[in-house]
Amino acid sequence: MQQLNADIPPLLSQALSASNVSAHWERRVFGQHTGDGYVAGMDPEVLPALVGCFPAALRQSLARRRADAPARAPLQLRVSIHVGPLPTSGLGVPMVHTHRLLDDNSLRSVLSRGNPEITNTVVVISQRVYEDVFESGCVNGDVLPEQFMRRLVKVKKFQQPAFVHIPGFDWRLADPDIFEPIGTTDMATEQLAPGPGVPPQGAPPARGTVNLNHHGEHGIQAYNLFDRGRGQR
């Protein structure tokens, strides 16, 4: 736990610097360690960079960590990005919703199925973030809306659509049961549905369609979040 607390902030700083938002990161609010994670809030104007640049930058930072210390176990990170008004304490409904997004079992399923040396980052963003970034046309970087798979997140009493992103992954190559536990034979009760402007499976994607909280094992907070679950990071 102590080693994780020491490892996470430098990784976040590296990825956010590569995303050109390091100045905003230095001015983060309610930043705190959360056991095996970290949570903080930033100005919502960084959303285009957080969605468009940060996931790939974080993946690269984790890959460099693995290359520099091959004897250490690979670190996998779950990330949640949400936006909404919060007081300086960080306590409020947007914070709770960010926790719920991160608690979606699909994120853990992706990391448990993937090779930890290849799939080290999975990101979930709220529908509000998706709409604010892609429908505004303000996304930074070369990420496409088709790289985000729409999913209905159900955690406790929380139930809202969100979008899952695996940096560098093409969702058209995914097995239909990618979010189901390994060995499950029942059909999924929550069908994956394409988001706004994303064609159904089998149809060619239409091109041009159209905070930072990082947290521990049980959730995330405010605008963006990075988290680790079940011993994974």
Image (cartoon, helix red, strand yellow):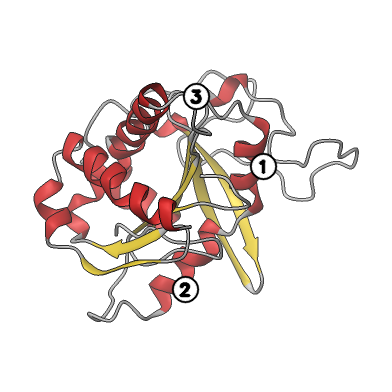
Q: Given this view, does label 1 or label 2 mark the residue nearer the observer? A: 1
Q: Secondary structure at mark 1?
A: helix
The alpha-carbon separation of the residues under discs 2 and 3 comes to 28 Å
Q: How many marks?
A: 3
The residue located at (71%, 44%) in the rendering is 191
Can you give x and y, in whole percent of width and height, for residue 37 in the image?
A: 43, 58
Q: Is residue 86 left or right of residue 59?
A: left
The residue singled out by tag 1 in the image is: 109
Return the mark for residue 96.
2
For the residues bearing labels 1 and 2, Cβ distance under 8 angstroms: no
Q: Amino acid at mark 1?
A: Ser
Going from N to C along the chain, the mark reached first, 2 or 3, is 2
- Which tag is nearer the camera, tag 3 or tag 1? 1
User: Which mark identifies residue 169?
Assistant: 3
Q: Nearer the viewer, residue 112 or 73?
A: 73
Q: Give neighbour class at mark 2: few <14, some 14-19, many 20+ (Cα, 10 Å).
A: some
Residue 120 shows up from this direction: yes
Image point 52% across, 57% down: which residue?
A: 102
Measuring 61% from the left and 19% from the top, which residue is drawn there? Answer: 173
User: What residue is shown at x 37% (from left), y 60% (from top)?
Assistant: 38
Answer above or below: position of 67 versus 25. Answer: above
The type of residue carrying mark 3 is: Phe
Is any atom of residue 137 visible in this view?
Answer: no
Q: Which mark is residue 97?
A: none
- How crowded pointer 1 is (Cα within 10 Å; few <14, some 14-19, many 20+) is rated as some
**Residue 8: percent from the left, percent from the top?**
35, 49
